[in-house]
Amino acid sequence: GEIFEDLSNLIQLREFRLNDNHFEGTFPNFLGSFQQLEVVNVNNNLLTGDLALPLAVGDLEYLKEFAFQNNELKGVVPEFICDLLLDVLTADCWGTSSPIDC
């Protein structure tokens, strides 16, 4: 199935862990609404399309882990993600045929 936008109503969410499922569709564009968010982990799903993160994700001052490897995402990890003081950033950005250009 897809990641439902209804989850965006959980504005006090601290951990968005949906890894190791069979979620399909695009990367959730509502992550910037979780002002208390510390962890995003959507590794090992079937997400497709461009990694189009809203600028609001760059304002998530508590975010420490951002992991989205082993999906079918394309695009560039935005510079504002690199500016966050993350403890963990995992993406499909290693190897010669990488779909994400870190």
Image: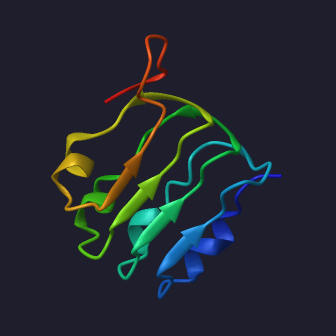
Residue at the farthest right position: 1
Q: Foreground: 37 or 65?
A: 65
Residue 3 to residue 50: above or below: below
Q: Residue at x 36, y 57 (%)?
A: 88
Image coords of residue 69 (percent x, y): 54, 41
Q: Quadrant of residue 101?
A: top left
Q: Quadrant of residue 9?
A: bottom right
Residue 47 to residue 39: above or below: above
The quarter of the picture where the C terminus appears is top left
In-image side of 11 versus 87 (left or right): right
Q: Residue at x 28, y 53 (%)?
A: 55
Residue at the farthest top position: 96
Give the total number of marks visible in the rendering.
0
Q: Foreground: 89 or 11?
A: 89
Colour basis: rainbow
Q: Residue at x 49, y 63 (%)?
A: 40
Image coords of residue 91 (percent x, y): 45, 39
Residue 41 to residue 89: above or below: below
Q: Quadrant of residue 52?
A: top left
Residue at the farthest bottom position: 12
In-image side of 2 versus 102 (left or right): right
Image coords of residue 63 (percent x, y): 33, 69
Q: Residue at x 16, y 52 (%)?
A: 83
Residue 100 to residue 14: above or below: above
In-image side of 86 versus 46 (left or right): left
Image coords of residue 18 (percent x, y): 66, 62
